[in-house]
């Protein structure tokens, strides 16, 4: 089935994030145009958008490639994420609406079900991702754009690439509850501190996975 040009970007994003297009793969505009049955102009536009999301890189005399995932790249991404998500929590403590609070509370109840049934909620995304809903509750447009558009898909790519065997979903869920409680109590300083610790712990787990795979 042909892919409409306006649908190509999210389709390519998913192909990169889920490993259908593996890290380091050279991307050929003619080949992608044939594969998705669209014009090369649509492919070129989509690749530029993926480059803006950090999923595609252009190397001298090599053209466009799926970005390679490295421990150094992960460390840089999580350093930015730690600072921005911490800030988002602090702002959300003052700006979250009752509707958003209810949605996040219900979401954690759903995640508890996933954990109890041994179905990792870390696979959730978009409206089912705790972090995604929480930083949107900051109501800071620039911050939401940075976290939701420019960093979120690359984060998903690292999550998919690494199995997180070192991660404890029950501990992660407990930390999510603690963060949300601080936000709902209006304690922005505590919410920021808890989120920064939470993100730092995730970074350590993913880096441990990189090290394990290299051994």
Image (cartoon, helix red, strand yellow):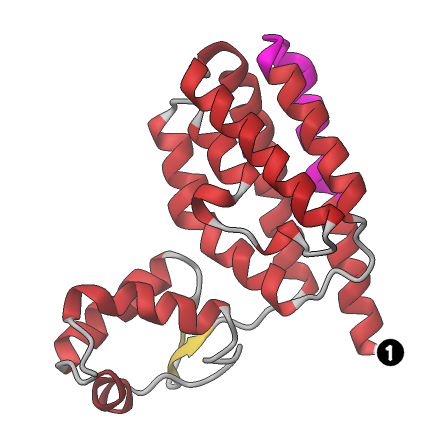
Percent x, y of residue 50? 35, 64
- Residue 51 to residue 132: above or below: below
Percent x, y of residue 32? 28, 85
Residue under the point 74% across and 55% down? 118
Q: Which residues are magenta?
A: 184-201
For the question of whether residue 145 can be seen, the reply is yes
Check residue 100 for magenta coloring. Answer: no
In the picture, the quarter occupied by the N terminus is bottom left
User: Which residue is tagged 1?
Assistant: 215
Q: How many marks?
A: 1
Left/right of residue 187 with respect to residue 43 in the rendered view: right
- Residue 170 to residue 17: above or below: above
Residue under the point 67% across and 43% down? 113
**Closer to the camera in the image, 57 or 25:** 25
Residue under the point 56% across and 38% down? 130
Residue under the point 20% across and 68% down? 45
**Closer to the camera in the image, 32 or 128:** 128
Percent x, y of residue 65? 42, 78
Percent x, y of residue 192? 64, 22
């Amino acid at each position: 089935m042909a892919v409409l040009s306006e649908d190509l970007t999210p389709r390519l994003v998913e192909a990169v994030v889920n490993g259908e297009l593996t890290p380091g793969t050279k991307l050929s505009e003619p080949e992608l145009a044939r594969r998705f049955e669209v014009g090369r102009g649509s492919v070129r536009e989509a690749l530029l958008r993926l480059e803006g999301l950090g999923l595609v890189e252009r190397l001298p005399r090599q053209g466009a490639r799926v970005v390679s995932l490295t421990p150094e790249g992960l460390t840089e991404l999580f350093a930015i994420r730690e600072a921005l998500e911490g800030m988002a929590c602090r702002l959300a403590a003052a700006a979250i609406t009752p509707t958003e609070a209810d949605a996040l509370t219900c979401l954690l109840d759903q995640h508890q079900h996933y954990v109890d049934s041994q179905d990792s909620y870390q696979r959730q995304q978009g409206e089912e991702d705790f972090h995604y809903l929480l930083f949107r509750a900051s109501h800071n447009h620039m911050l939401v754009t940075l976290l939701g558009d420019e960093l979120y898909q690359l984060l998903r790519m690292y999550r998919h690439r690494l199995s997180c065997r070192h991660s404890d979903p029950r501990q992660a869920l407990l930390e999510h509850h603690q963060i949300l409680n601080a936000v709902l109590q209006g304690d922005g300083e505590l919410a920021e501190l808890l989120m920064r610790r939470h993100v730092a712990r995730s970074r350590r787990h993913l880096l441990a996975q990189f090290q394990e795979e290299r051994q």
